[in-house]
Amino acid sequence: MTFRLTLTVNGEPRAIELDDPRVTLLDLLRERLGLTGSKKGCDRGQCGACTVLVAGRRVNSCLALAVSLDGADILTIEGLARGDALHPVQSAFIEHDGFQCGFCTPGQIMSAVGLIREGQAGDDPERIREGMSGNLCRCGAYIGITQAVLDAQARMAGATQGDAA
Amino acid sequence: MNRFDYVRAGSVAEAVAAAAEPGAVYLAAGTNLLDLMKGSIARPGRLVDVTHLPGLDRIEHLPGGGVRIGALVRNSDLAYDPDFAKSHPAVAEALLSGASAQLRNAATVAGNLLQRTRCPYFYDPASACNKRDPGAGCDARGGETRLHAVLGWSEHCIATHPSDFCVPLVSLDAVVEVEGTSGAREVPLDALHRLPEDRPDRETVLEPGDLIVALRLPAEAAGFAGHSRYLKVRDRTSYAFAVVSASASLRLEGGRIGEARLALGGVALKPWRARAAEAALTGAEPTERSFARAAEAALAEARPSGDNAYKIELARRLIVRTLTLAADGTPERMPALPASAFSGDALHA
């Protein structure tokens, strides 16, 4: 049986045919759409390396069946920058050394983008650490990650105020 | 992961009919089910996807007070709903102390109620487990039992129910609305989960095809909003299941406790309502002495199921702490570390 679904991936409508309902969103992105930025760490929802935004909300793509997400709008790490212009969260991760080996980084960045959109953490480092607890970093770059999220959050809040003014 | 038929339900009636077949299970977000299927712990023959059903993702404030929460409302949407968080702060705090932000964004209300135990022997196909394979035995008995049950367990199963959300809910008399092959009915949350007895494979009172469509909290639940806390002791500050948790809600009248609600998590195979403790608190002064008496009453029947006697004393102390904080008053703002007994940057120094 073939399952037909439509997804918007990084702004682009994609008609997808699946021969097997077992394909997770992560495997669809990596193995069938060639978007290997989202990483397969634990594949069980524990590490956060596979984090993407679905309808603007961060989720673990390893624990979602692609067939169930018919019609959804997906944003992955590949869709974050505008050409060569990095997203403020990407720039902040570079400036604050928010990584070492880089494997968890796409998930960390997508999670941070989701966290900032949720608007619950503000400029409180404790709330940022709590809000990022679903993303593990085996290199232990947590101090830089927290700094990067704080900085990006401040820059994005400033940019929004600038736009309004 | 085993092969399965995938059915996308267009209506509740269609879903119930499709899921009443042997081997069929419902799929909502799948955050627990897919994990179990990847480990070959669950091997359903059919997945009935209910995520596209209309109308099950609403939070309705009912005319007589009370709240009706659709089964597909996501955990984070409920926790961050300003009206709900204000009227049911312990429920919001429990939700935010569970799992990670990514999981809370996906996981549904009904899925949270029906999540399976995280007993490591249940999760290990090489271990004997009466829950997975009735009559096979229980390798947790005599194994690593630090996190296992101290209340309501049997020789056949010593697992615990992992939900945080269910703990304040059961204390506040939440009711589950169910649609099944013989129509609609209601089940009090306290009666939804079964204790293991000699059939730990039968986890709830739901029958094949039964679909939870909503969860309801009665109007009285909001009467505790000013004095409600949920505290959770865990092995790390965030993103960990409870070793022991407690939800305490008080209605204070003229310096005394008019009414008390207390429930425990992490101690039994169901969210554990401590009715004897509630009775001990009614009419008492909100003092440490009253709280200690309530804690004694709550754990009177407790006994270790292995190397976990410490959980009994831990639960007593957590009850006193949670009642003390509830009596002090619900914080104005959700704590930075929800349900944590600790706070502040010193933790990370």
Image (cartoon, rainbow, N blue to C red):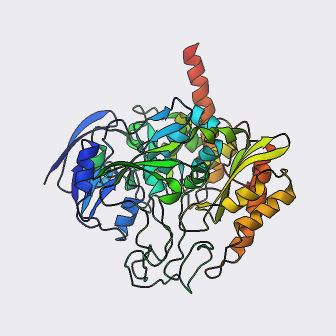
A123 relative to B191 in the view: left or right? right
Residue B114 percent across, percent down from the top left: 44, 58
Q: The N terminus of chain B is located in which quarter?
A: bottom left
- Residue at the image position 43 percent from the left and 66 percent from the top: B203
* Image vertical order of residue B305 relative to residue B282, above or below: below
The reply to whether residue B75 is in sight is yes
> Along the horizontal axis of the image, is B285 left or right of A12?
right
The location of residue B169, given as percent across then percent down, is: 57, 50
Specify whether B183 is left or right of B223. Answer: left
Query: Is residue A132 visible from the viewing direction of this image?
Result: no
Residue A126 coordinates in the image, percent (x, y): 69, 46
Decide which of B116, B250 is in the foreground and name it: B250
Residue B135 picture quarter: bottom left
Q: Quadrant of residue A44?
A: bottom left
Give the residue drawn at x 34%, y 60%: B207
Quadrant hosting residue A6: top left
Residue A91's place in the image compared with B137, above or below, is: above
Q: How many marks?
A: 0
Nearer the observer, B251 or B79: B251
Q: From the image, which quarter does the C terminus of chain B lie in?
A: bottom right
Give the answer, above or below, for where B34 lies relative to A18. Answer: below
* Residue at the extreme left: A1
User: B303 or B314, which is in the foreground?
Assistant: B303
The picture places residue B325, in percent across and down from the top left corner, at 78, 49
Question: In the image, is B292 to the left or to the right of B82?
Answer: right
Residue B30 versus residue B45 in the image, above or below: above
